[in-house]
């Protein structure tokens, strides 16, 4: 029986361990997309911290920050992003171009900055439709005024045009291999200033900015791969924002499914674990009481019927707050003759109470000793018990007064004093 029980326990533990080991689940996107490799919120964040557009271009291509992770030409090197600008009156359009080869560029995003008559400045970071899908736009709201605002509307300001091109880069720049897409997503969030707000919108504010951008647009990679646009890569969503929403829904659904499967497996493991006790340890009701007899018990903690329990006596006393056990065996007790006799022939079991124990022995009665709350007092009444009487009271001698004694002595002298 013990061997069978041990084997059942070991089998259950091994099964449950295998189930739990399979519950380790990592949710990742099934298909990585080109748009996974340049986070426009990170672009908006470093734009608000840059001193000028030259500093902005440096931050984009900093090997330590690694904001960019695009490798469109597939040479296992992150593409260099150059920055060029087109301006007209109070409108500035900053274009981010991926340098792919000699005189080969692909626009990946634009930053449109406009100041209105009340000197309020709005910024929109717009993803290129080929890379991110149409109308993928973020409007950052900065907690502090970007230094670039003071530069753009200076009287001596001239539009910025990057001097770098393929094979000719600044000294601070060095090549690095692109991250896997899931790792890049975790890495780039460190460089996003969370004090700013990044609001997604689906419409552009300035039609003039669109016209200015079309005069300087470069889409060499798009023309080389016309069937690799965002809508071709993701036919069930419109742009990158909807792709993120769909991925979030899938991740939530998968997480719910994993949790549901885990709960089902845990329930099955518990059922398997419970089966090992069926027919081996018996049925439990309430709290477990190891030793249980056939005596009726009142207000006990529970009953545990067990054919293989430690004490398999026919009748045993169970400790409880109030119980009467008529089948409990009575211990034989034969005291000395001077202490009286005790007859064990009594059907009533001793009743225990919480009061201090007082023993009362009556040999003429067959009842078992009863404990009460009175202080401990022993009384013995036996037929052969000698009864000692109290010692006899002796009267003390009475002394007469001195005068009476003197008179008695004079009377018994017989004569007077001789002269």
Image: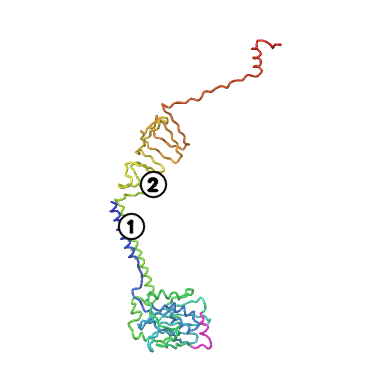
- Work out which quarter of the rendered image holds the C terminus and state it: top right
Residue occupying the far right of the picture: 419
Residue to which mark 2 is pinned: 301
Percent position (x, y) of residue 225? 33, 84
SS for callout 1:
helix
Give the residue drawn at x 47%, y 36%.
376
* Figure check: 313 above or below 207: above
Toward which corner of the image does residue 32 lie, by quadrant? Answer: bottom left
SS for callout 2:
loop
* Figure check: 194 above or below 309: below
Percent position (x, y) of residue 103? 38, 89
Coloured how?
A: rainbow
Residue extent of the magenta highlight: 146-158
The CA distance from mark 1 to mark 2 is 25 Å
* Figure check: 198 above or below 94: above
Left or right: where 414 falls relative to 84: right
Residue to which mark 1 is pinned: 270
């Amino acid at each position: 029986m013990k061997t069978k029980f041990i084997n059942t326990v070991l089998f259950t533990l091994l099964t449950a361990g295998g189930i739990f080991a399979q519950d380790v689940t990592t949710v990742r996107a099934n298909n990585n997309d080109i748009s996974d490799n340049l986070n426009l919120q990170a672009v908006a964040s470093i734009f608000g911290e840059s001193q000028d557009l030259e500093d902005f271009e440096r931050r984009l291509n900093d090997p330590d920050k690694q904001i960019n992770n695009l490798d469109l030409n597939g040479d296992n090197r992150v593409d260099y992003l150059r920055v060029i600008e087109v301006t007209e009156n109070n409108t500035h359009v900053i274009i981010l171009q991926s340098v792919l080869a000699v005189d080969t560029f692909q626009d990946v995003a634009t930053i449109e900055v406009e100041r209105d008559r009340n000197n309020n400045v709005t910024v929109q970071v717009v993803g290129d439709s080929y890379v991110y899908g149409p109308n993928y736009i973020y409007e950052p709201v900065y907690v502090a005024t970007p230094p670039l605002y003071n530069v753009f509307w200076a009287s001596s300001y001239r539009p910025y045009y990057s001097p770098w091109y393929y094979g000719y880069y600044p000294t601070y720049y060095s090549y690095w291999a692109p991250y896997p897409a899931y790792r890049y997503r975790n890495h780039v969030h460190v460089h996003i200033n969370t004090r700013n707000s990044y609001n997604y919108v689906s419409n552009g504010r300035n039609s003039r900015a669109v016209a200015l951008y079309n005069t300087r647009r470069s889409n060499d990679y798009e023309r080389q791969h016309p069937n690799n646009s965002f809508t071709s890569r993701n036919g069930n969503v419109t742009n990158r924002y909807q792709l993120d929403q769909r991925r979030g829904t899938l991740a939530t659904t998968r997480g719910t499914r994993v949790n549901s499967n885990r709960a089902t497996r845990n329930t099955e493991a518990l059922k398997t674990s419970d089966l090992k006790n069926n027919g081996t340890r018996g049925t439990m009701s309430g709290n477990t009481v190891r030793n249980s007899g056939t005596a009726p018990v009142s207000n006990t903690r529970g009953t545990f019927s067990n054919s293989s329990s430690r004490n398999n006596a026919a009748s045993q006393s169970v400790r409880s707050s109030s119980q009467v056990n008529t089948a409990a065996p009575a211990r034989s007790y034969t005291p000395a003759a001077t202490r009286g006799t005790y007859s064990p022939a009594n059907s009533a079991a001793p009743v225990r109470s919480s009061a201090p124990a007082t023993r009362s022995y009556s040999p003429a009665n067959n009842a078992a000793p009863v404990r009460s709350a009175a202080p401990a007092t022993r009384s013995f009444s036996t037929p052969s018990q000698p009864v000692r009487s109290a010692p006899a009271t002796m009267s003390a001698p009475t002394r007469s007064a001195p005068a009476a004694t003197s008179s008695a002595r004079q009377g018994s002298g017989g004569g007077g004093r001789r002269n």
